[in-house]
Amino acid sequence: MRVLLEINQLLWGGPVLILLMGLHLYHTFHLRFIQRRIIRGIHLSLGEDADSPSHGFSRFGSLTTTLAATLGTGNIVGVSTAVFLGGPGAVFWCWLTGVFGMATTYAETYLCSKYRYPDKDGRLQSGPMYLLQNLLQRRSLAILYAAALCTSAFFIGCTTQSNAITDSCSQVFGITAPISAIITAFVVGLILLQGRKWIEKFSMAVVPTMAIFFLGGCILYLILHRNYIPDALSHIFSSAFGLRPAGGGLAGFTIGKAVRYGVARGLFTNEAGLGTAGLVAGNSSENQAKNQALISMSASFWDTVVLCAITGLVLVSFQLEYPTEWTALSAGSLTAAAFGKLPFFGDEILAVAVISFALATLVGWSFFGRQGYDYLFHGHGTKLYLILYILMIFVGGVMPLNLVWELTDLINLFLLIPSVYLLVHCRNMLQ
């Protein structure tokens, strides 16, 4: 565990953060601040489909499926660990990663939507691995990306989510980790056996409902504790640049930690730069690449710019109001403690939100991992992939949380490198 932590601190402490933020900034300026078109993206995602969605994800389905894979425990547990380990300033860097990351999401989904390749059955396929192979003739990087995608599905998609489910079930409902892990694996297995359309339908049903549900709980907390909002905002912005000294019940965090954990959790939450959003965009029914890219970009907006920011504001407000309780809590229990201050059903609201988000992410990431597996093995042995995926749901449910998150940070790097290579070499193909 210590070796893993040191590796992540070395890599995420400078080189990767510079690379990631540089990528986001480059696409922001190269695409003339494409973030300004977010209203258009939201309108498209909620509008009617221009074509029949029978051969791919519908507009709204592509939005919710992308969100299903990203709008998970990163918005709840991930932000909690970022604030715990990086201080209030981590909220700012997580939010900023989301704002600039929207441009990178647009870039990678535009490419995957524009360049699609038929498989042996004539169905169009796309994703970073196909673009690396066909556009750039870099099959070795394509294989690396696909292999990392499968591995990430087992860790990012499985372990972090099932761990969050078992933790919530244990704390709120008194269900032991092995039992809740088995139930989770069974439910997800039933959905996955039905194929892509069930994944889309499940995402369309669960994601909007639970996002509104969780957001409502956060807004209620902020209304009831509104006196702490100004100080919380002040601490977030000043701590982000190391301008505020330790005090007032807050631990002394360095700007380095704020950036490291804020950006790392921001990346985990919206996955901008990892290329995963392109897997959904490349399998959508939308034929206009610009439209699909705007729809995908709106997913990053809702995920990090809105929900992560509001969650972080709740946590820092709670930290200021209850500094003694804060110091006695673990990294993953901060959001639960804050929701516990709601006058009614706070624990239950959060538990339902965590379980629902995590289930959606488990289902969404199963699709991502399946794309990588199909690329590597040409569609053969998919039952083995599903069995391994379901098995990892159980394993993740009983693993220590800190180990899970450190593994996630490391595995993200192996998705990031091929994806960044693709974006850099295809920058002139963007519109």
Image (cartoon, grey):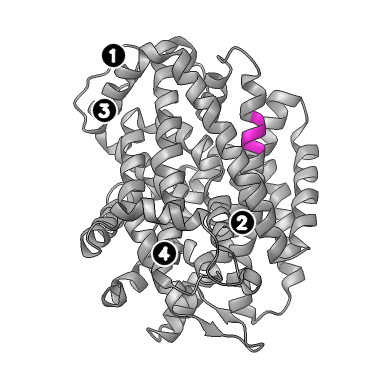
SS class, disc 1: loop
The amino acid marked with disc number 3 is: Ser
Residue 232 coordinates in the image, percent (x, y)? 33, 21
Residue under label 2: 364
Q: Is any atom of residue 271 visible in this view?
A: no
Q: Which of marks 2 and 4 is nearer the N terminus?
A: 4
Q: Earlier in the sequence, mark 3 or mark 2?
A: 3
- In the rendered structure, the answer to whether residue 299 lies left or right of residue 57 reads left
Question: Which is nearer the eye, 321 or 394?
Answer: 321
Q: Is residue 324 magenta?
A: no
Mark 1 Cα shell of 10 Å, populated few (<14), some (14-19), many (≥20): few
The magenta region covers 351-355
User: Is the Cβ of the residue at disc 2 closer than 8 Å to that at disc 1?
Assistant: no
Question: Which is nearer the eye, 224 or 277?
Answer: 224
User: Is the Cβ of the residue at disc 4 closer than 8 Å to that at disc 1?
Assistant: no
SS class, disc 2: helix
User: Is the Cβ of the residue at disc 3 closer than 8 Å to that at disc 4?
Assistant: no
The amino acid marked with disc number 4 is: Ala
Could you tell me how far apart the alpha carbons at marks 2 and 1 are, in whole angstroms? Answer: 42 Å
Q: Earlier in the sequence, mark 3 or mark 4?
A: 3
Residue under label 1: 247
Residue under label 3: 239
Magenta segment main secondary structure: helix
- In the rendered structure, the answer to whether residue 379 lies left or right of residue 301 reads right
Residue 199 coordinates in the image, percent (x, y)? 68, 59
Location of residue 303 with respect to 283 vertically, above or below: above
Q: Earlier in the sequence, mark 4 or mark 1?
A: 1
Residue under label 4: 293
